[in-house]
Amino acid sequence: MVKAQLVGSKLIVFDVNDARRIFSQGFFGKPLGVKKPKDTDISSPLELSLIEGMYLLENKVISVEYMGRELSIDEFKGIAISRVDNFEDLYLVYKELRKEGFIVRSGLKYGADFAVYRLRPGLEHAPYLIKVIKFNSNIDPGDLIGWGRLSHSVRKKLIIAVIYPDKEVSYIMFKWFKP
């Protein structure tokens, strides 16, 4: 099992061979010091988000070490919840999208929760941006327009992932049009 170290709000896989294997098995994480890797033959440690780490931990791909000891899934989840706003809802959507075969990356630079790829980063631009909200949340109309304008300006489709109280998820895709 691959060892990942919890460092702040990230996980780092320091062993380059392990990093390469994880990255090539699903484009998890981001090689340190590499902006846009063009292939899977990376040669640096791998940085994983806590959401990616939870997914890999649950799927027994990694173990997580913190302060000299291995964390259980529950311990890691507790830390992730304390360090990432809305972690449980984000993780629910992340896991569902991964299950459907999508590559899911941070959408922070686009003002979204996730950027989603059909193929992989480096081969295509992410065609979708995902915003995760709870059912019955109040959404400011200006925010919705802003998300739509931004997604349109970067040529991506905006998808709102709605989390219902029973943890079901519905996806609503928006398309920008001019009347």
Image: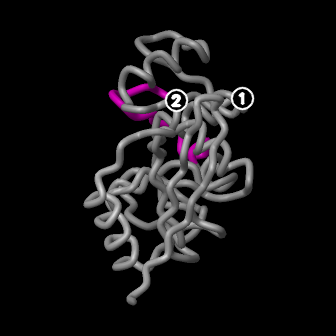
* Dot 2: element: helix
Rendered image: mark on residue 60: 1
Q: Is residue 1 above or below residue 72?
A: below
Q: Is residue 134 visible?
A: yes
For the residue pair 159 and 10, the one nearer the viewer reads as 159
For the residue pair 105 and 40, the one nearer the viewer reads as 105
Q: Quadrant of residue 150?
A: bottom left
* Disc number lying in front (1 or 2): 2
Local crowd at mark 1 within 10 Å, few (<14), some, or many (≥20)? few
Q: Is residue 14 visible?
A: no
Q: Residue at x 61, y 24 (%)?
A: 63
Please state the horizontal and vertical placement of residue 129, each as a whole percent of the image: 47, 62
Q: Quadrant of residue 66?
A: top left
Please state the horizontal and vertical placement of residue 9, each as a whole percent of the image: 36, 31
At label 2, which amino acid type do we have? Answer: Glu
Please state the horizontal and vertical placement of residue 50, each as a whole percent of the image: 47, 34
- Give the labeled residue for mark 2: 88
Q: Which residues are magenta?
A: 5-19
Q: CA distance from mark 1 to mark 2?
A: 19 Å
Q: Residue at x 63, y 44 (%)?
A: 169
Q: Residue at x 62, y 35 (%)?
A: 55
Q: Is residue 126 left or right of residue 35?
A: right
For the residue pair 155 and 77, the one nearer the viewer reads as 155
Rendered image: mark on residue 41: none
Q: Residue at x 60, y 45 (%)?
A: 17
At label 1, which amino acid type do we have? Answer: Lys
Looking at marks 1 and 2 on the same chain, the residue that comes earlier in the sequence is marked by 1
* Dot 1: element: loop
Q: Quadrant of residue 112?
A: bottom left
The image quadrant where one finds the N terminus is top right
Please state the horizontal and vertical placement of residue 29, each as a whole percent of the image: 51, 48
